[in-house]
Image: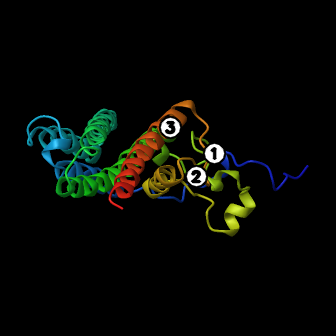
Amino acid sequence: MAKDSREPIAPEDFTDDYDPEPRWPALVAALAAGGLYTALPDVLTLGPRWLFPSVFLALLIPAVISHHVGRHHLNTIFGFAVDGVLTAGLIISVTLLVGALPGASAEKARQLLRSAAALWITNILVFALWYWRLDAGGPHQRGKRAGHCDGAILFPQMTMNKKALKETGEQNWSPNFIDYLFLAFNTSTAFSPTDAPVLARWAKVLMMIQSLLSLLIIALLAARAINTL
């Protein structure tokens, strides 16, 4: 009996003609998030100015090196540590922003509003890194497979049958950092998934945290803008 063209794709249905996903977009995103945090005013940071960039670089550099030398387990550990430091810095800064912005003077408020916009962008980058790091075993595990048919996030390509994937040239499609960045951007703007529903509980928890942080930042920006009218 012939296979139904609507039959879900399976790992054995893919070929070996594929390239592992690039890591440099995630590295750029991590550096951008770290740079945005470092540029925040003192009132939105915790501890001395040198503390965060020192810890961040002390974790990021070994993460990059361990990937290039093939120590994937160490790369995963350092990668999680980098994401954890960025997340902690983000939550601390948003908490400090909530306390600092309402009673700030006009001049200081303008500085804090610019910082709030930077934190909103940081929120997108940080959670994109989490989704990229956690989904389907992480980038190293995804890189071992040609194609992507299972994960915590249901991308549209995962619902397409083999014939449709081949017709669109996506038979070996697998998500990379840009796909997770798109998901994180939608979550921060719509406060919900758009084209890619989340299936796993950990992804739902992360998405709720990201939406809450984004909502706090946008609510503060809107409240301050109304007060200036």
Q: Amino acid at mark 2?
A: Gly
User: In the rendered image, which quarter is residue 21 located in?
Assistant: bottom left
Q: Nearer the viewer, residue 32 or 70?
A: 32
Question: Label 2 to label 1, Cα distance in Å?
Answer: 7 Å
Q: Is residue 147 left or right of residue 133?
A: right
Asked where in the image residue 69 lies, by quadrant, the reply is: top left
Q: Secondary structure at mark 2?
A: loop
- Work out whether mark 3 precedes mark 2 in sequence or the reverse, and give the earlier one: 2
Q: In this figure, which residue is indicated by the disc labeled 2? A: 147
* Relative side of 78 to 1, left or right: left
Residue at 64 percent across and 56 percent down: it is 157
Q: Earlier in the sequence, mark 2 or mark 1?
A: 1
Q: Nearer the viewer, residue 101 or 208?
A: 101
Say which of marks 3 and 2 sits in front.
3
Q: Pinpoint residue 153: horizontal percent, then vertical percent.
A: 57, 44
Answer yes or no: is residue 20 visible: no
Q: Position of residue 19 (x, y in %)?
A: 46, 58
Q: Which quadrant of the figure has residue 138?
A: top left
**Spatial separation of the CA atoms under disc 1 and disc 3:** 31 Å
Q: Residues within 10 Å of mark 2 (few under 14, many from 20)?
A: many
- State if disc 1 and disc 2 touch (CB < 8 Å): yes
The percent position of residue 100, horizontal first and vertical second, equals: 24, 42
Q: Is residue 132 above or below residue 161?
A: above
Mark on residue 208? Answer: 3
Residue 175 percent location from the top left of the image: 51, 53
Residue shown at 19%/44% (left/top)?
A: 61
Q: Nearer the viewer, mark 1 or mark 3?
A: 3
Q: Is residue 130 left or right of residue 16?
A: left
From the viewer's side, name the closer residue of 229 and 34.
229
Mark 3 residue element: helix
Give the residue pinned by disc 1. Answer: 11
